Amino acid sequence: MTDAVTIGTAGHIDHGKTALVRALTGVDLDRLPEERARGITIELGFAALELGGGEDEPAAAVRAGLVDVPGHERFVRTMLAGAAAIDVGLLVVAADDGVMPQTREHLAILDLLGVRHGVVALAKCDLAEPDWRELVEADLREVLAGTTLADAPVIPTSARRGEGIEALRHALAAAATAAAADRRHAVADEPFRLMIDRSFALTGRGTVVTGTAASGSVAVGDVLEVHPGDRTVRVRELHVHGRTQDRVERGGRVAIALAGVHHTEIARGDELTSPGAVRDGAMLAVRLRMLPGAPRPLRPRERVRLHLGTAVRSARVRLLDAPALEPGGEGLALLAIDGPVPAIHGQPFVIRAESPALTLGGGAVLVAASRPIRRSAEAGVARVRALAEAVEAERLHAALAIRGERRIPATAPWTDAGLAGEDAATAMAGLGQRGDVVLADDAKPVHAATLESWTGAVLVALARHHREHALSAGMPRDQLATAPAVRRVAEGDLPWVVGRTIADGRVREAGGGRLALAGFEPDLTPRHRTIRTRLLEAYREAGFRPPDPPVAAGPEARRADVDAMMRLCVSEGDLVHLGGGTYLDADHERALRDRVRGHLTAETATEGLTMSGLRILLDTTRKHAVPFGEYLDRIGVTRRRGDVRVLVDG
Ligand SMILES: Nc1nc2c(ncn2[C@@H]2O[C@H](COP(=O)(O)OP(=O)(O)OP(=O)(O)O)[C@@H](O)[C@H]2O)c(=O)[nH]1
Ligand SMILES: [Mg+2]
């Protein structure tokens, strides 16, 4: 048994898709009463299909999941959800009816989604004369030419008579084997992504979602993210076609029982991913291709339906290369979406006109940006071009810049740039050598421009502080963290950013946990300095009998200067304001707390400290003991109990 692959049907309404699935698997997927009554498929159907190996490798059996889609033109969006993560397309064309509109549209969708492996079933051959069948086949070859299914085998079948079914099974096995081999070339450490097509509640199991695992693998107990959004969930159980498994590799049709989410909080269009692997963006930069058969050009700023994974969103297209895009044309574009969607570099998408609903084109995502990229902003557009065209290191450079000022998970920019494994490491090292990328203290990459803007924010905040507090030695570090200019720096990164500015000499430590710009000196006149020195000396000498500030400063000092210097001494941490007009030297304030605590924890002190007890303990006057006591209550060292103060527990 080798890799699981997913096969998806495609084709015009009533051409016999569901009948062929039944012939191949024995399962009738048209189960809904309305499907039975109208004889059409409305919802996606799923079945397991065991395939022998292809003709080259008969021993290698391939296990496939089969998604059966509706052909009705009104359900193309359902078809798109079903085709979101398939590996092999099974295009069904009725021999009696021939190529019809949804034959072309479904084929175009498989082509746009990059489905490279396929089989064409010529169905209902019992209803077509051989001559007619030949005409249909010739027509079909023409339609297939130039698409990803150009070389797909065409297998004549009749589900009614059971003819051609084994040949079809063989052709599917060969295509599935080829798809599985493709897979093995892909990267091993890619993140898990499941595009959800259903969410429901199952008695005893809670929330269950189903979908196709587009990449990576998942195991029971894993924590996953739900996108869009930031909710995390835990995998309770994994099922593949009714069988419980401990682990599921990509390509499988999976049902996952989840803990941590109600089934109504998750829906078709959402995605389950490994933590941090995928990012939501309300703007996608894309490479866009119009179908050659599109009925008209894409209009400037046209609003379209965006089909991405299993999601459908409304989006406005902004073309970057030309005002309009002709059928068959190709160019770069920005898609402004009505809300965030998860997407990664290289992910295929399809756009359809709003009305009448028809497929216009599609392409591949370059990047999902969480902040708008403006058409008019040259730098932003240049980055998009770099992501589309440039060599690896440049792509990474552009991806990091577009990520912008938010913290980047270590692997994310690689995914953004469509890089993995050694290619990613080499590109990153190259950028590091050029100085375009800096590794933070936790080894996470930060774009040099991002670091520059963070550094700028710190310098601006310090400069503003110096302007507003010209007498202060510098800005306390904790004030810096909450300064408006600095809020865009991720919190955990601030010490690192500040450390770099100190190391490169742009900022210095100004004592008492303060920071100052290198060239800054507090703007003190000689008169200020004299007053400050006098105040500090007076409070130091006075101990627990502190003077009034004007007295401490001396009769010749101006009141305004004394007030300014008192504020400075407090803000620098040399004096502590106890309340009212009472200040203490910082060391004495510490001694005050220590002495009272020591006294009240001593074995001799059981009944607390009275006001006169406090006065004696500190060898001070009643005038000072009162504010000291109130201060100790206020900062939570003591509390009043009747006439005495007792220690606050802990
Ligand atoms: N004569 C004949 N009729 C067939 C054959 N296969 C399917 N049919 C009939 O064609 C009709 C449509 O078949 P479905 O398999 O439901 O077609 P479908 O492509 O799944 O249709 P949608 O899902 O609605 O797009 C049914 O009435 C089938 O019985 C066949 O090989 N021969
Ligand atoms: Mg059907």
Image (spheres, helix red, strand yellow):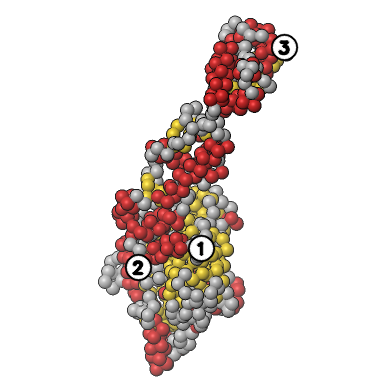
What residue is shown with label 1? 374
From the viewer's perspective, is the residue at label 2 or at label 1 nearer? 1
Q: Nearer the viewer, mark 2 or mark 3?
A: 3
Q: Secondary structure at mark 2?
A: helix
Q: Residues within 10 Å of mark 2 (few under 14, many from 20)?
A: many
The residue carrying mark 2 is: 179
Q: Give the amino acid type for the residue marked by disc 1 in the picture.
A: Arg
Q: Quadrant of the N terminus?
A: bottom left
Query: Residue 449: where, in percent of width, then height?
Result: 42, 51
Residue appearing at x 44%, y 50% in the figure:
450
Q: Quadrant of the C terminus?
A: top right
Circles 2 and 3: CB atoms closer than 8 Å: no
| Front label number (1 vs 3) | 1
Residue 53 in view (yes/no) = yes
How far separated are the C-alphas under marks 2 and 3?
Answer: 87 Å
Counting every numbered tag in the picture gives 3
